[in-house]
Image (cartoon, helix red, strand yellow):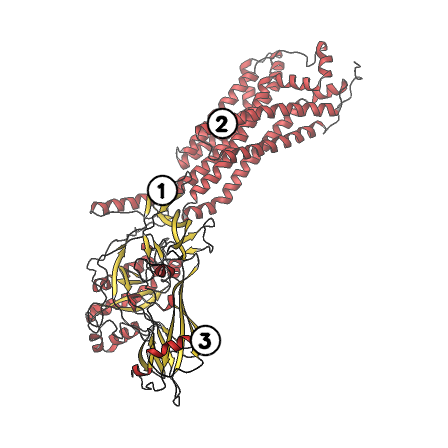
Amino acid sequence: FLGRVTPKNLFPTLGIPLPAADATAPTGYRVQVTVRGNDGTSSRVLQDYSESMILGPNAPRTNGATFLNAFAAQSAIAQFVVNDQAFVVLKSIPIVSSTVVAVDPVAEQKLLGVGGDFLTPLRTYDRLAQLTGPLNCHSVSALSGAQAKTFAALSANLGIWAVNSAAHCIYGTTSTFAPYVRNASAFPPMTLTATFSSTVSAPTEVNRAALSTVEKAAVTRIGVVTVDLSSRLRPFSGSDLAITWPGQTASANPVYANPNSATTVGPLQVDSPSVKTSANGQVSARLLPRGILQPDGSPGLSSEDLALGATQTYRDSLLQAGPTIGSADLPGAAPLEVGSYLPAKVRSGAETNDTPLGAYDPAAVRINAGSSATGLGDLEPTLSGLGVAAQSASAITSIAGARTMGVTDPVDAVRVRVVGVDGYSDASVRKITAVAQKITALGFTVHVVSGSSAQAVLLDVPAFISGPASAEGHPTQSDLRPVTRSYTKLGAATAVQADLGSLTSALFLASAIAALALLILAHAMALGDRREASGTMSVLGISRRQRFRWSLNEDTVPIAVIAGCLLTAIGVAGFGSTTRIMLGATIVAAFSACAFAWAGSRTPDIRPRLRRSTRSRMLSSRAGYALRQSRSPLWLTLSRAAAIAVVTVTASLVVTLIPDLVAQTSNTRLGAFAVQASAPINIAAAGLVLTSAVAMLISLERSEAARRLGEYRTLINNGWTPADVRRTSTTQLVIVFVLAVILSAAGVVIQVLAGLAPSLGLQLTALSALLTVTAVVSFLSARRSLTERKPIAGKAPVAH
């Protein structure tokens, strides 16, 4: 970064058609000039004035002749005549700073690949200067042959609005050429509108005293001309600001070299205590206003100053040595434009993720919808380059060109590209780290930017000037809050990898816990049947050890499959967090299988299902029967409730974790890309986990209802109706789900106390929705299982 150059005077030049040869009376003209800018929030007036002029009939018709006696104006100055047009210089427009950077064009082009083709003219000029020595307006005339053709091609006229000022010796004949390529979209939006009118009655004289009559006289409108100043401006004050007369074509494009001031810019001023990072990694800060500047760069003092485009600065202008530009009487550098470029094309064609320096395309400042600004979009840089938005580089020169401009030690940073790194991997990280350590050993400061990415930062912008001054002289200010700007986050790839790993682990953990809970519930629900079979086997003389092995054989194959997957995962991914979860799940599954197989091998007490002494009381109360069924065995009811609670609490936690992890991962541009790429598989995995858990719960509930179908048939044969049976079964499910809700609420409270729930409201909503869906589907499924087959008719119902 070489600094900023700020031209002191940029004069628009107006070409007025000369009077007809037979004209006998002067002509009075009135020109209304308005310069407007747009900072992204609104279009604002930067300059507004009226110019009255008188052009006499005796104006000279010779090119280059002066015509002072034939012209009078309030502030405009007559200059010369070219091709029947009298050229007049108007007031200077607001100043615009240009940012200048230097690169090694050979290394930079190699780094950028195809996107760096715009640097070829710099390489060509440097090779020419190495052969010929320093070039200026004197020495270039001595070139001949191929060298003369090369220079002519580099310094050719760059278009109707771009006379090459250095080649025309505007910066002095002894100033050494310094090549640069120009950013074609560097300057903020700024337009000049000129409204031309002529007086109805002709003035009697051509002098300043007669101007008062022109100001008050009736006029006839001639036309309006609009000039896009942002496309006309050039760095180093080599700007063509010719204003054509309505209906005329410019016959000359005068360019003036004006005095420049060279400065550098302090960083954006941030209130340090305001810097915060939210739980999902979003960074925010508050900016500090530094002062108010007029469009000409001086401090705003009066209401008139503030009324015309005053801006609020958020950076400091530092008086340091910068580029030294020559003039007619002061030798220096003669900036020679040898090409141009568009930052968007550089970024799209570059082979690197982020083009070096950020000078080609600085991060845009986006105005958020919550801002007080009426027009939403990107915030534009101020004319001085001291606002919120960063100013793009206006000119890029070579290292040799920087030294010509007086910057003897221009190299601030060297970017190193490590050979053999084709993608992001652990091996690549180790290789880059090793190179960085070797460079550090040489005494340099190293920043590893491989795997880095842009991260959005919320900026609170107070006291933003959004309108002209009030009657008291105070500018209209409003808080522009918040805006979003991207900064480079080092190590973004590692952070994204960790976040995506957390997301995968969360989904895997949810599936593992849900599978374990349902496995244990399945074991619990099968325990009664296993014990009845164990009793039969005991009567046949089969030992308990044999009965235990018989029960355990049912789980041998599933546990073997899980263990095989665990060993495969350890061999592929090592002993990481995922394999630890799989190991824990395998151990719990094996312990559960062993525990329930041992409990199922126990010989049960053989008792009748219905006792005559209590039959009347049981049959008279359907709700009482449902309560007794839930109480005996109570552990089975609690196991069903606990399984539902574990599945729903785990699923609801995943539902709340996924948006938080996605938000954290998507903070960077790289993270957003990674999340977008992995979203389908993660959504599918989450949906599969939830769907499988609900499906297994429903399957178990249907199995439980089918297991009790014989009891319900007996009840129907003893006077109950199918509606009574369905109502009793529903009551039992309600009891289970009431217990599940209590356990789920306790689980959520524990999560909140442990700090695991990122969003309590979202988790409670997800928990309620999951419980409701599971309960409804379970009720309907259980009712259907009871009515799939008709009860077997037995003896006649007993009357009570």
**Location of residue 191 in the rendering, given as x and y in whole percent from the top left corner:** 40, 66
Question: Where is 218 relative to 731, above or below?
Answer: below
Tag shown at residue 274: 1
**Location of residue 562 in the rendering, given as x and y in whole percent from the top left corner:** 49, 30
Question: Which of the 4 quarters of the picture holds residue 518?
Answer: top right
Q: Residues within 10 Å of mark 1 (few under 14, many from 20)?
A: few
Which type of secondary structure does the marked residue at label 3 adopt?
strand
Question: Which of the 4 quarters of the picture holds residue 82?
Answer: bottom left
- Amino acid under label 3? Gly
- Indicate which disc, 1 or 2, sits on the residue closer to the N terminus: 1
Q: Residues within 10 Å of mark 2 (few under 14, many from 20)?
A: some
In the rendered image, which residue does mark 3 sit on?
223
The answer to whether any part of residue 664 appears in the image is: yes
Question: Where is 298 relative to 276, above or below?
Answer: below
Q: Nearer the viewer, mark 3 or mark 2?
A: 3
Which type of secondary structure does the marked residue at label 1 adopt?
strand
Tag shown at residue 749: 2
Residue at horizontal 20 percent and vertical 57 percent from the top: 409
- Amino acid under label 1? Ser
Q: Nearer the viewer, mark 1 or mark 3?
A: 3
What is the distance, in whole Å, between disc 3 and disc 2 at their CAs? Answer: 75 Å
- Indicate which disc, 1 or 3, sits on the residue closer to the N terminus: 3
What is the distance, in whole Å, between disc 1 and disc 2 at their CAs? Answer: 32 Å
Q: Nearer the viewer, mark 1 or mark 2?
A: 1
**Location of residue 187 in the rendering, given as x and y in whole percent from the top left corner:** 36, 62
Question: Which of the 4 quarters of the picture holds residue 636?
Answer: top right
The answer to whether any part of residue 554 appears in the image is: no
Q: Tags 3 and 2 in contact by the CB under 8 Å rule?
A: no
